[in-house]
């Protein structure tokens, strides 16, 4: 179930940050000129304060860290092709609070993970018919905007997902398409995200659609390979049939993440953490689901070229392949669509 939670956490950025238009990026690990595409990005006073207080980010430290990070990539013996633009590298620097060595390790694992688990991470195309249907018609995730602490908030409605139609690979690819579409947004990089997961109406099928090995690998990737700042996860109305599996998933989570996961019997309890006005109209709030979905569709359309460019990055996986337990994917058709 937690796999589904994080599938959509970062989608909250749609309502809270301006679209950044950038030219076609490069995966040349040592380009003649580096792309400084973080320039001109306007941060609120709140996010500037968070960057300084939580990440110890200053302009001098940011520029020096980018310089050292790029030099390291240029001479890395196993990285063959990689984005080196500022927004891409700042994902990792901010996720690791400017611990350069930790950011470098996360990038190595990120690149390796994309190649080891191709069915989850490659060809993240929003025009894929399953991805399009999940975004436009299912609407199982609603990005709700910024909370009072500047964090992005998303609501996941588990009951929206028909597990007789969509399997774990559809949901996994959707998850990473959304992650990649929003990873470059500075508000997400700096303040992180909050997820509210409404489990009312969830069935056994929702809890068993992911293989145990996939869940284990995902939780490890979440902790060590994805540049995420998960601030809080609020799981609401978890049915009895899901509690045992939920506890098992929690056992795979890093200790720091477990401290940020909360269980609630009702949405009223969540209101201690989230402003009611951020919730959709059906929950007594003011958010319009159709407007959110339209914003999400536009965002994915604008980012399609960048999403597909990721497949051109490459690392020699042999030194890192032992980090994950790989599953047998031979019985699954890989491509634009998975039937």
Image (cartoon, grey):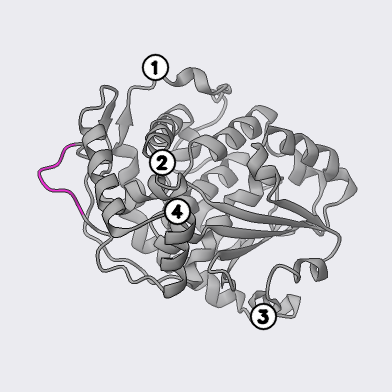
Give the residue at the far bottom of this rendering: 286
- Image marks 3 and 2: residues in contact by CB distance under 8 Å: no
- Relative to 41, is 256 above or below? above
Lower sequence index among marks 1 and 3: 3
Lower sequence index among marks 2 and 4: 4
Q: Which residue is mark 4?
A: 55
Q: Which residue is mark 2?
A: 99
Q: How many marks?
A: 4
Which span is picked out in magenta?
30-35
- Relative to 327, is 311 above or below? below
For label 2, count other residues whose C-alpha is less than 10 Å away and answer few (under 14), some (14-19) or many (20+): some
Q: Separation of disc 3 and disc 4 at Cα?
A: 29 Å
**Which residue is painted at 41% across and 67% down in the image?**
48
Lower sequence index among marks 2 and 1: 2
**Which residue is painted at 84% across and 65% down in the image?**
266
Q: Which residue is mark 1?
A: 318
Q: Separation of disc 1 and disc 3 at Cα?
A: 50 Å
Between tags 1 and 4, which lies in front? Answer: 4
Is residue 119 among the parts visible in the rendering? yes
Query: Left or right: 258 with respect to 36?
Result: right
For label 4, count other residues whose C-alpha is less than 10 Å away and answer few (under 14), some (14-19) or many (20+): some
Q: Callout 1: helix, strand or loop?
A: loop
Where in the figure is residue 49, as x and y percent of width and height? Answer: 45, 67
Q: Looking at the rendered structure, which numbered label has been put on residue 227?
A: none
Indicate yes or no whether the magenta region holds residue 291.
no
Where in the figure is residue 58, as x and y percent of width and height? Answer: 33, 58
Q: Callout 3: helix, strand or loop?
A: helix
**Which residue is painted at 10% across and 43% down in the image?**
32
Query: Left or right: 110 with respect to 59?
Result: right
Between tags 2 and 1, which lies in front? Answer: 2
Q: Which residue is mark 3?
A: 277
């Amino acid at each position: 179930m937690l796999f589904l939670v994080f599938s959509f956490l970062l989608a909250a950025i749609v309502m809270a940050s301006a679209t950044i238009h950038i030219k076609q990026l490069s995966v040349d690990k040592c380009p003649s000129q580096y792309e400084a595409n973080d320039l001109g990005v306007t941060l609120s006073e709140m996010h500037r304060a968070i960057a300084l207080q939580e990440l110890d980010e200053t302009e001098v430290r940011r520029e020096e860290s980018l310089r050292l990070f790029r030099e390291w990539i240029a001479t890395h013996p196993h990285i063959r092709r990689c984005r080196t633009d500022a927004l891409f590298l700042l994902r990792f620097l901010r996720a690791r609070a400017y611990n350069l060595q930790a950011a470098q390790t996360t990038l190595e694992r990120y690149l390796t993970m994309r190649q080891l688990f191709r069915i989850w991470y490659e060809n993240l195309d929003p025009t894929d018919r399953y991805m399009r249907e999940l975004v436009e018609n299912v609407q199982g995730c609603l990005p709700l905007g910024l909370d009072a602490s500047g964090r992005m908030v998303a609501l996941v409605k588990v009951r929206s997902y028909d597990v007789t139609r969509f399997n774990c690979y559809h949901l996994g690819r959707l998850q990473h398409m959304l992650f990649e579409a929003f990873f470059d947004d500075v508000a997400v990089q700096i303040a992180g995200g909050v997820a509210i997961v409404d489990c009312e109406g969830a069935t056994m099928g929702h809890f068993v659609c992911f293989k145990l090995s996939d869940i284990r690998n995902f939780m490890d990737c979440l902790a060590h390979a994805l540049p995420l700042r998960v601030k809080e996860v609020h799981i609401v109305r978890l049915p009895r049939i899901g509690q045992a599996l939920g506890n098992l998933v929690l056992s795979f989570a890093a200790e720091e993440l477990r401290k940020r996961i909360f269980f609630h019997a009702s949405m009223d309890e969540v209101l201690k953490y989230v402003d009611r006005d951020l919730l959709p109209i059906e929950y007594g709030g003011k958010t319009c689901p159709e407007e959110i979905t339209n914003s999400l569709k536009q965002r994915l359309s604008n980012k399609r070229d960048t999403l597909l460019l990721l497949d051109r990055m490459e690392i020699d996986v042999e030194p890192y392949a032992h980090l994950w337990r790989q599953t047998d994917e031979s019985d699954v058709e890989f491509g634009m669509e998975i039937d």
